[in-house]
Image: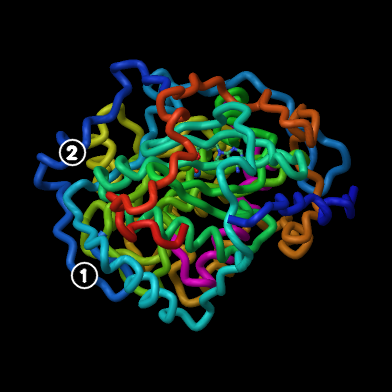
Amino acid sequence: MIKFDLMNNQSEQPSHSSMTNKLPPSQLQPLSLEELLSNNQYNNSSSASNCDTLTTNLNNELESSTSVLTLMDNDFTSKLHKPIAQSVRQPHLLLNETYPVNEITNNEKNNSTESQYQIVPRITKGKYKHNDFQIMRTLGTGSFGRVHLVQSTHNYRYYAMKVLKKSKIIKLKQVEHTNDERLMLSAVNHPFIIRMWGTFQDLNFVYMIMDYIEGGELFSLLRKSKKFPVPVAKFYAAEVILAIEYLHKHDIIYRDLKPENILLDKYGHIKLTDFGFAKYCNDVTFTIVGTPDYIAAEIIQTKGYNKSVDWWSLGVLIYEMLSGFTPFYDSNTLKTYDNILNAPLKFPMSKNFSNEVIDLLTKLINRDLSQRLGNLQNGVEDIKNHIWFQEVNWHKMFKKNIETPYEPPIKAGHGDTSQYEYFEEDTEDMKQYGIMLNLGEEDPYQDAFDGF
Ligand SMILES: Nc1ncnc2c1ncn2[C@@H]1O[C@H](COP(=O)(O)OP(=O)(O)O)[C@@H](O)[C@H]1O
Ligand SMILES: [Mg+2]
């Protein structure tokens, strides 16, 4: 069945007046950053690159009519692979990088002339301010801040507001990543990528206002279902491919593909969110970033890498969707890295793993860059033309003219948060939201977050 109304699902821009952990079980916690960094093998000996300053039950086929994914019990759960708790998969952050704060704007400028396809930021209107929004609850937390459901005090629509704490950003040396996140989000415009409406800052925090995506994380759906039937995995993979294709065409590497960062809208289409590690780069870059289970081998090797790291992660994402676990998982992050570098890629004995998908995954999760699909002469076309995707009509997929396999059970447009986990609110931090710099007072962060 073709859903023509799917093209009208974009929220309206919030009107603006003057325009302006849960802890994981201890045995599953990753090593601390200090522990990771004290191991020389994984230290980043970055050298400057020209684009980076050192630094992822349907019974019918995809086009079937009204199929709804039934949450299935898993028929294959290896005891070796316990489901991974969400909070365990924290990104790898490298602490020993330096960001000369006063060069940030220059880097932005340099980067913005790099690509012939570079997209121009869409957000041209003035800024929002804190009291344009009423905070409802927390939808997710990350390493430096949290994402709240908020309601516009003007048009009463719901949005997601990502709040990052300046002191944490500085401490974890993420100034450039944060500025890049704003830059990328303000520029991208794609049906399967989150839309950001604007940003603002106060004394202690930076804020990003995005559409609120009501259906929750693909991660939650995957953990509930344990694994997806092949057509479901294929559907999500296909939408992800179109999003990554778009980013790469505009010389953006995404670098954090994983189910936690893939949200489902009210119809069940994906929205890629979290541009915290996205980077303009049309060549080679060196930074060790990403989430351990999903990081490509060449990132760990610190020899420089290119956009094709996202195609490796796509392979890991498809593997995880079909099996419920990632191929190199270990509770010890260093062992995960060791597996990524050295362990043979093994596939579960499961009907989900046909010869076709094994062929695809072997070519995506491939340490040899001269063989990795997506990194060859025909680029993304080699992936889209792979036999596993043979029934996918890419044009229809892009137009959202293909029935989604699962529609989140939500009341659309009402700030329904039933698909999101519960997070305790950080009332201490929230008390500081909206505090501005007093006249004549010196800004402790100077111009570090100028673009917000
Ligand atoms: N636009 C959004 N709509 C709804 N939930 C969101 C949105 N953006 C983020 N979230 C939720 O917040 C979580 C953290 O946001 P993310 O941008 O991924 O931050 P981090 O960089 O800390 O991982 C996401 O995994 C998701 O659960
Ligand atoms: Mg995230």
Name the dominant secondary structure of the magenta segment.
Answer: helix
Of residues 337 and 75, the one nearer the viewer is 337
> Which residue occupies 75% across, 65% down?
395
Question: Furthest-front residue in view?
Answer: 440
Say which mark, if any, is on residue 211. Answer: none
Of residues 62 and 280, the one nearer the viewer is 280
Give the quarter of the image for residue 391.
bottom right
> Which residue occupies 54% across, 53% down?
199
Say which mark, if any, is on residue 48. Answer: 1
Mark 1: secondary structure: loop
> Which residue occupies 60% across, 58% down?
243
Residue 251: within the magenta? yes
Label 1 packing within 10 angstroms: few (<14), some (14-19), many (20+): some
In three-dimensional space, the C-alpha distance between marks 1 and 2, rounded to whole angstroms, equals 22 Å
Position of 5 with respect to 345 (left or right) is right
Q: Which residue is mark 2?
A: 36
User: Is residue 349 at all visible to an observer of this figure?
Assistant: no
Task: Say which amino acid is labelled 1.
Answer: Ala
Position of 304 with respect to 327 (left or right) is left
What segment carries the magenta color? 226-253
Position of 62 with respect to 90 (left or right) is right
Task: Say which amino acid is labelled 2.
Answer: Leu
Residue 369 picture location, percent across and down = 35, 65
